[in-house]
Amino acid sequence: MKRDDIAALSRMERNRAVRSRTIIYCVALAWLLCAASVWPGTQAWAQSQPADQPAASRPAPLAPSAPADAAPATNPADATSASGLPGDPPASQPASAPASQEAVTTAPANRAVTAQPIAVGGPIVLNFVDAPLDVVLQYLSEAAGLVVVRTSRLDARITIVSRQPVSTDEAVSLLDTALAARGYAAVRNERTLKIVTIEQARRELIPVRSGNDPTQVQPTDRIITQVIPIRYADATKLKADLASLVPDTADLAANAASNSLILTSTESNVRRVMEIIRAIDVTMSEVSQVRVFQLRYANASNAARLITDLFRTDQTARAWQT
């Protein structure tokens, strides 16, 4: 073989080796470029998966995930950027992200406003129109610091409207008025407010008062027990006369030893009965006046006998006429 042929073969071998190395370098470079483009999306997908999920069961990532603070798109196929490429985030996401962040920051402030506690012992404003009884009792418990006890179930709706602040006693009195129409009463003992029927209220720990002055009794629907001393009339007979004027829900008893009446009812009923008793007791006192006459010449015993006979004769004549 000639020297020229050997040189030509050598050049051909060198060119073939150069071409092989060039192809290998191009393939390696292309693989590196593909890996560099896919690696960020694969890392973000791996971070979003649960730690306890097996790697084999995880689905393969299709595209790089959107930033954490961006609003999620309802359809990935529709989430196109301004350039039209499907992998880029939508152009409207940066504008909507601050709005969502603002809504998140303002939500705790709204909850704090609605959850403000009611100042115990402060003014009570009642504005309930056809409201459930449980709602009214819950408000009184929070506003007045009362412990509400219910002995029976009452599914009632009441209306109490007071534009001006009222005290705790006035609020309980208004509640009594609303419950009285349904046969119930609110019995208050210090901080305890018990909701019972009127029949039960007469035997509860209710206020006991004494006196015959009706102006000292407030015309409310609060249930009390009033001991009414009688000065001139007979308490036993007076009880029989007043039986038709007392409501069925009231208790009226007479004590002959002290000549007194014991009435358990609402303050308005007690006041009305006391006004009637006062008018009757005052009238009888005016009739039953005692006067002393000194006789100068006649005998006192004979004069008393004569006057008694005269009145007896007059009463007999009236009886015959009737």
Image (cartoon, helix red, strand yellow):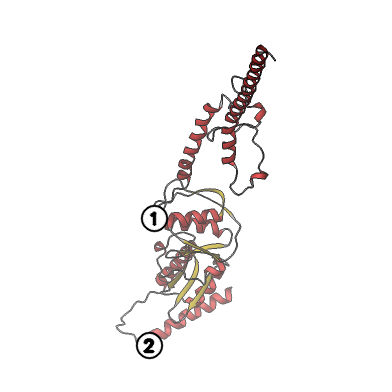
Circle 2 Cα neighbour tier, 10 Å, few/some/many (<14 / 14–19 / ≥20): few
Q: Earlier in the sequence, mark 2 or mark 1?
A: 1
> In which quarter of the view is residue 247 placed?
bottom right
> In which quarter of the view is residue 208 placed?
bottom left
Disc 1 element: loop
Q: Which residue is mark 2?
A: 301
Q: Quadrant of the N terminus?
A: top right
Q: Which residue is mark 1?
A: 121
Disc 2 element: helix
Circle 1 Cα neighbour tier, 10 Å, few/some/many (<14 / 14–19 / ≥20): few
User: Image point 65% across, 42% down: which residue?
Assistant: 58
> Distance from label 2 to label 1 (Cα)?
72 Å
Q: Which mark is residue 93?
A: none
Q: Position of residue 110 (x, y in %)?
A: 48, 41
Q: Position of residue 282 (x, y in %)?
A: 41, 68
User: Image point 60% across, 62% down: which residue?
Assistant: 153
Residue 65 in view: no
> In which quarter of the view is residue 259 placed?
bottom left
Residue type at numbered disc 2: Ser
Q: With respect to residue 159, does 73 lie above or below?
A: above
Residue type at numbered disc 1: Gly
Mark 2 and mark 1 residues within 8 Å of each other at the beta carbon: no
The image shows a total of numbered marks equal to: 2
Q: Nearer the viewer, mark 2 or mark 1?
A: 1
Residue 262 in view: yes
Q: Quadrant of the C terminus?
A: bottom right
Q: Position of residue 83 (x, y in %)?
A: 60, 19
